[in-house]
Amino acid sequence: MYVVSKWGFDLIPPLTLGFLRVAVGAVALYAVVRARGVAVDRADYRGFAVLGGWVALTIASQFLGTELTNASQGSLLTVLTPVFTVVLGAAVLGEEVTRRSAGGMALAAAGTLLVLAGQYDLTRLGGGNVAGVGALVLASIAWAGYTVWGVPLVRKYSALTAATYSCLASLPPLAALSAAELAVRAPPLAAMASPGALLAVAYLGLGSTAAAWYLWYKGLETVSAGTVAAFFFAQPLVGTALGAALLGEAIGPGFVVGGATMAAGIWLVSTAADGI
């Protein structure tokens, strides 16, 4: 997602790409919901509106931050999301943070840092745009909010319903941000309608939004927000593996050691509630 987004910014400005991404994802999800005849109570509209706000804040800050920072900063700041999710889960939902789960989170974070250290020069992290770093931190907080505040609606309805209506609720603010952006920095229409741009929007909308957000909420149907969040640590590992498989990028020894450490940490977190 980060690679396609960064490439797509050359054709479509970030806020507009974010709006198009969520719009495509929302249409795809809503088509499935309509086919299943799912309905929601009016009393829950406000809850879905709150989730839509978290989505809009996540997309806007994430895409602006991605445009302004480098790959190492973006990957490293990703590991903040599970931390914020655990904190909010404890504060808002009353989820218990045991020694086992806390230790697992720390171990998973250490493994992720080992993977990143093998791919990037982490001593250059301070060389990027401060505003971009701040935007990515905000995006991490917002996604944690989307995760935690989504739990009641996911469990009342389903992952599909919660993901669908939260996407739909985010479209008005994202559309307003996109309109403001295009009024200031509108690219050539030919670039925005080029095959590459359309493919980027399709991938981000169907893969990184409709499928990924549904699967994220699917986890929340049965396990705690903190447990689901621990799997966020795997994102840089998967990115590195895809870079090696698709782009021929080199993988250092830290990838194997870090990946094993991260996997052990996630296992500790995901089994903490079972008393294993």
Image (spheres, rainbow, N blue to C red):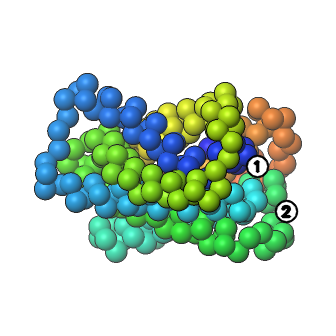
Q: Which residue is mark 2?
A: 121
Which amino acid, mark 2? Asp
- The mark found on residue 255 in the picture is 1
Where 244 sits versus 108, above or below? above
Residue 45 sits in quarter: bottom left
Residue at coordinates 33% horizontally, 67% vertically from top-left? 95
* Residue at the extreme top of the image, as rendered: 35
Which amino acid, mark 1? Phe
Residue at coordinates 17% horizontally, 44% vertically from top-left? 40
Task: Determine the secondary structure under disc 1.
Answer: helix
In this rendering, position of residue 116 left or right of residue 213: right
Q: CA distance from mark 1 to mark 2?
A: 14 Å
Residue at coordinates 76% horizontally, 59% vertically from top-left? 70
Nearest to the observer: residue 168 or residue 80:
168
Residue 239 visible within the image = no
Q: Position of residue 90 (x, y in %)?
A: 36, 71
Task: Determine the secondary structure under disc 2.
Answer: loop
